[in-house]
Amino acid sequence: MIRILLVDDHAMFREGLKQILAKHSDMRVVDEAGSGQEVIEKILQQKLDVVLLDISLPGRSGPELLTEIKKLKPELAVLVLSMHPEDQYAVRMMKSGALGYITKESAPEELISAIRKVSTGRHYISTKLAEEMAVALETNAPKLPHLTLSNREFHVMRMLASGKSLKEIAGELMISEKTVTTYRARILEKMKLHNNVELTLYAIENKLLPWYFSVRDRDNSTRE
């Protein structure tokens, strides 16, 4: 029996996943979490085989949360299930310790296959992701500026690009505004940008903002 923790901040989405997983006798959802803090509590309380992890959670970013999970439970298999395309987040998450990455647009059969594979300690990697990781490993391959950021810098960058103020970011991450200002300066320097407007434009062009995907999906649905 594969014991699973579902992690997503949308209760309705978790319900849908539970219905899919309930059809398979070798899997059981033992608990759910809707925030990073809940995830840490649950993995310490429950005996688990797989964490099915969404990376767009309130507060703590996906890569940072994943790093903490692996520190506390290094043997625990983590499969990322995200609305973000593989080319935006997969390599970063795999480097942080995930055994697999799958998008929410994937077929249920692919999700089931991925869960079974990572539960045995093996990696689940699509052909597209394998190509992305191969490129990432090439030391001479040109990197997009946001790929040079640390996990925390990447999270702060997305928050700044989303239009959040220094005070809002400091409150969500539980750090001082001065620390956020330091992160902002470091991010702009690494990415060779000058202000938040340029940062936002870059994030939109590279599809790095959560709301971009909901707008895109809504527009696609309208066209259909």
Image (cartoon, rainbow, N blue to C red):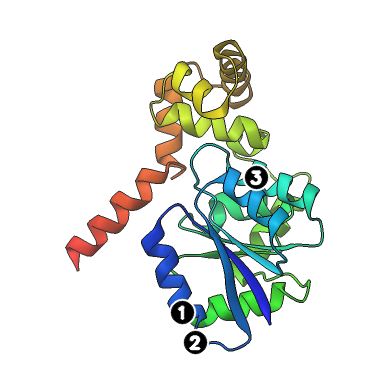
Q: Nearer the viewer, residue 153 or 22?
A: 22
Q: Specify the label residue 23 is tagged with.
A: 2
Name the residue type under label 3: Leu
Answer with left or right where residue 199 lies relative to residue 121.
Answer: left
- Residue drawn at (68%, 82%), measured in percent from left and top? 1
Whether residues under marks 2 and 3 lie with C-beta atoms below 8 angstroms apart, the answer is no
Left or right of 27 in this view: 135: right
Mark before the other along the chain sequence, 2 or 3? 2
Q: Quadrant of the C terminus?
A: bottom left
Confirm or deny contact between disc 2 and disc 1 (CB under 8 A): yes
Residue marked by disc 3: 65
Does residue 106 appear in this view? no
Instruction: Say if 76 sits above or below 167 in the image.
Output: below
Residue at x 72% of width, y 74% of height: 119
Q: Residue furthest top?
A: 178
Residue 31 in percent (x, y) is at 57, 64
Callout 1 secondary element: helix
Question: What residue is at 40 percent from the left and 38 percent from the top?
Answer: 204
Disc on the earlier residue, 3 or 1: 1
How much space separates mark 2 and mark 1, taking CA atoms?
A: 6 Å
Tell me the residue that label 1 is attached to.
20
